């Protein structure tokens, strides 16, 4: 995130969804978006469907788990092997 334009875009975004982040990117994001150490845990080793949402000045942690045996999961999954297996492609 050394790129100045990328930093400006993130700093001016009304909504950002952050999933698991690499250590370097995580530190940059925390500094740029004023994410505390307590909030940083939500983007450190986060599982699938977990992270942190920034909306304006609010930070909201989330865990978005779907039961895998539902039609909604089969339609929404981004795992190519599951998509092929489910016959959605």
Image (cartoon, rainbow, N blue to C red):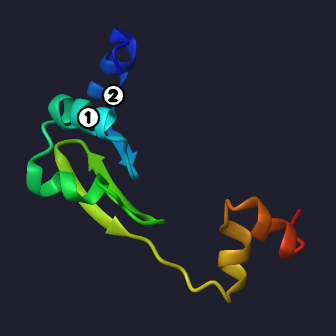
Q: Whole-percent x and y of residue 1?
A: 35, 22
Does 85 sit left or right of 44 as displayed?
right
In the rendered image, the vertical position of residue 5 relative to residue 31, given as above or below = above
Res 60 quadrant in image? bottom left
Residue most extreme to the top: 4
* Front residue of 85 and 14: 85
Q: Which residue is mark 1?
A: 29
Q: Whole-percent x and y of residue 51?
A: 35, 58
Res 71 quadrant in image? bottom right
Q: Whole-percent x and y of residue 13?
A: 33, 31
Label annotation for residue 10: 2
Q: Whole-percent x and y of residue 83?
A: 79, 67
Nearest to viewer (mark 2 / mark 1) = 1
In the rendered image, the vertical position of residue 24 relative to residue 89, given as above or below = above
Q: Report if the CB atoms under discs 2 and 1 are less than 8 Å apart.
A: yes
Q: CA distance from mark 2 to mark 1?
A: 9 Å
Quarter of the picture holding the C terminus: bottom right
Label annotation for residue 82: none
| Residue shown at 90% from the left, 73% from the top | 87
Dot 1: what SS?
helix
| Residue shown at 26% from the left, 62% from the top | 61
| Residue shown at 18% from the left, 50% from the top | 58
Question: Which class describes the residues within 10 Å of circle 2: few (<14), some (14-19), or many (20+)?
Answer: some
* Front residue of 1 and 16: 1
- First along the sequence among labels 2 and 1: 2
Res 11 quadrant in image? top left
Question: Which class describes the residues within 10 Å of circle 1: few (<14), some (14-19), or many (20+)?
Answer: some
């Amino acid at each position: 995130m050394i790129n100045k334009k990328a930093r400006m875009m993130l700093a001016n975004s009304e909504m950002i969804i952050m999933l698991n982040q690499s250590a370097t990117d995580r530190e940059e994001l925390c500094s740029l978006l004023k994410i505390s150490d307590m909030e940083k845990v939500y983007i450190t080793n986060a599982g699938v469907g977990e992270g942190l949402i920034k909306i304006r000045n609010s930070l909201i942690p989330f865990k978005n788990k779907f039961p895998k045996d539902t039609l909604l999961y089969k339609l929404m999954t981004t795992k190519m092997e599951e998509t092929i297996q489910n016959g959605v492609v």
